[in-house]
Amino acid sequence: MNNPQRNIILTGPPRSGTTLACYLLNKAPDTVALHEPMNLRMFPDPEGGLLSIASFFREMRHSLLTDGTAVAKVAGDKIPDNPFQQVEGGRRQSIVQKGAVFFDKTLSEDFYLVIKQNAHFTFLLDRLREQYPCFAVIRNPVSTIASWNTIQAPVARGNLTVLKTLNPGLYEELERIPGLLDRQVRLAHELFACYLQLGEEQLIRYEQMAESGGAALGRIIPEAAALNETLESKNRNKLYPRQLLDEIKAALLSFDGAYWAFYSRDEVERI
């Protein structure tokens, strides 16, 4: 590869729209966006994680140029726009699993390769931004936390498994917070605090991505500015009970979290 700026880091809080961003970016020419292709074993500690990321970019770039395949979490044989099934009542289950995916598109030697991992990349941003173009998709924290409460995943407990190796002190601190919602709000704060390292041009708000039909992703891949998909914001998803939303809003408003650097109190109260 001749242009190191074509290896791109994409992150964001879980359930912020990062999978949708990958789905949309794959519609752009000369671009491949991989949804959570890496695993926990690749992040034994921060330094080991950085080495794994560099190696993985090389491996996936070689594989894609050789036979058009790469590793990612897929539904069937495609990267979906949402990795969790929609259900009425109960917790939503993941519909994706790790597998090979074939990209039937022409790729140049210097194609854009976007790799998306949420917590893994978020808590390494201080180092990653020195080596790669880094971007984050963020979403109104009310809807983000509400979505956590509808899925079957570690984040629904207000903690993240990868923190055991990347920031064990934070993992233990979160575990000691007794209330689930208090734990989730603190986790949201810690995630958003990492994005304070990024400039405004490196942030894509889920709300803008949905409203623009994906064109807001032009900040990541210039050609994505031509996207014009039919998208609908899920911030007021009917799966989010009104009582839960009210409780989340109250918890967010009572905490001086880093999310206030990105969303106003009015935006939180209006959900």
Image (cartoon, rainbow, N blue to C red):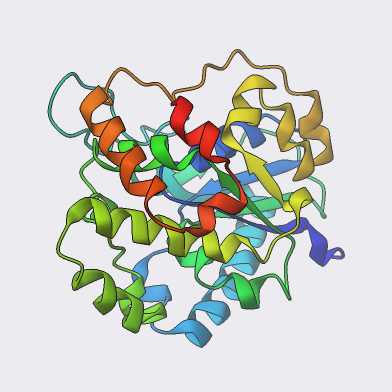
Residue 221 figure quarter? top right
The residue positioned farthest toward the top in the image shown:
230
Identify which residue, 246 or 197, lies in the foreground.
246
Q: Is residue 159 positioned above or below 99 on the image?
A: below
Q: Residue at x 41, y 79 (%)?
A: 166
Quadrant that contains the C terminus? top left
Identify which residue, 95 or 122, lies in the foreground.
122
* Residue 202 horizontal side relative to residue 139, left or right: right
Q: How many marks?
A: 0
Kindly tell me whether residue 98 is visible in this rendering.
no
Q: Is residue 120 positioned above or below 75 on the image?
A: below
* Residue 88 horizontal side relative to residue 110, left or right: left
Q: Residue at x 61, y 57 (%)?
A: 63
The residue positioned farthest toward the right in the image shown:
2
* Residue 227 horizontal side relative to residue 250, left or right: right
Q: Position of residue 91 (x, y in %)?
A: 17, 34
Q: Position of residue 73 (x, y in %)?
A: 41, 46
Quadrant that contains the N terminus? bottom right
Q: Is residue 20 positioned above or below 237 on the image?
A: below
Q: Residue at x 49, y 83 (%)?
A: 46
Identify which residue, 44 or 61, lies in the foreground.
44
